Image (spheres, rainbow, N blue to C red):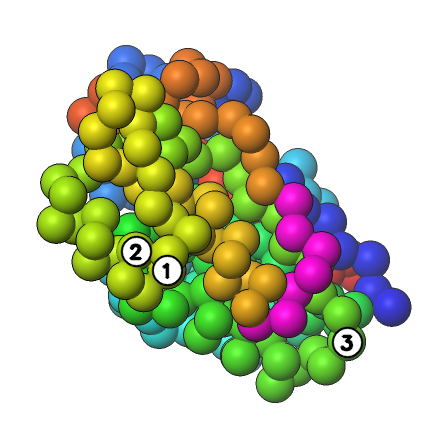
Amino acid sequence: MAAIRATFTTRDGGISVGPFAARNLASHVGDDPDAVAANRRGLTVEMHATRTVFMRQVHGSDVAVVDARSPGDVADVDALVTDVPGVALSVLVADCVPVVIAGSRAAAVVHAGRRGVQQGIVTAAIAALRELDDGPLRARLGPSVCGGCYEVPAAMQEEVAALVPAARATTRAGTSGLDLPAGVTAQLRAAGVTAVHASETCTVEDPSYFSYRRDGVTGRFAGVVMIES
């Protein structure tokens, strides 16, 4: 069984400044490209990885398999799967749910926002992972917006809950909301992942993490997984 390393970064440890301080890992939010590149290099070193693969996420349901021949970052997907040791897979978030999934010889990362949860990105990622690994899977959900903070219109809540009932929530203000971690957990369990650990940290409430809903202009932190060489 391969050893698998996973982590969720915070805002600490990078060189970005202003609203992106200090460890922004996203290249699409208006940060200095040189700072982003340096932050990404630091993450690769920290993971002891040969390289780190990022996605251009689009809130969809497409999954990419990263193999030894894959040239670099992957566009227009919301999950990555690999069985190549030493390659770190990264998902970038600032309120959406970052999911890392580990098997016995393969691993995946998933970007699970509202639209991705509706479209079944978690289920699609597990299906792709199962092509590489038929053993037991375990999953970790990183910090994200909680159901108490994620207020949505009632019609949107009904639309999501019709597909993922566990995502229905009431905010602390008593309004209609969505609990995406609960929805993702339900989807993982329905797909056969029995070992699921969800962070209790809310990105809106904890300034250690970037939060788009709290700050608007902000950076992105990462969920990262790697099969150790």
Residue 164 - label: 1
Q: From the viewer's perspective, tell me whether residue 22 is left or right of residue 168.
A: right
Residue 161 - label: 2
Residue nearest the viewer, comparing 4 with 18: 4
Q: Earlier in the sequence, mark 1 or mark 3?
A: 3
Q: Is residue 102 magenta?
A: no
**Do the residues under discs 2 and 1 have CB atoms within 8 angstroms?**
yes
Amino acid marked by disc 3: Gly
* Mark 2 vs mark 3: in front: 2
Q: From the viewer's perspective, tell me whether residue 171 is left or right of residue 185.
A: left
Q: Which residues are magenta?
A: 191-197
Q: Position of residue 205 (x, y in %)?
A: 40, 17
Q: Residues within 10 Å of mark 3 (few under 14, many from 20)?
A: few
| Residue 130 visible in the snapshot | yes
Amino acid marked by disc 1: Val
Q: Residues within 10 Å of mark 1 (few under 14, many from 20)?
A: many
Q: Is residue 196 magenta?
A: yes
Residue 42 picture quarter: top right
Q: Check the picture and name the quadrant holding the N terminus.
A: bottom right
Residue 190 picture quarter: bottom right
Amino acid marked by disc 2: Ala
Q: Check the picture and name the quadrant holding the C terminus.
A: bottom right
Q: Label 2 vs label 1: CA separation?
A: 5 Å
Q: From the viewer's perspective, tell me whether residue 111 is left or right of residue 75.
A: right
Q: Residue at x 44, y 17 (%)?
A: 206
- Element at badge 1? loop
Residue marked by disc 3? 135
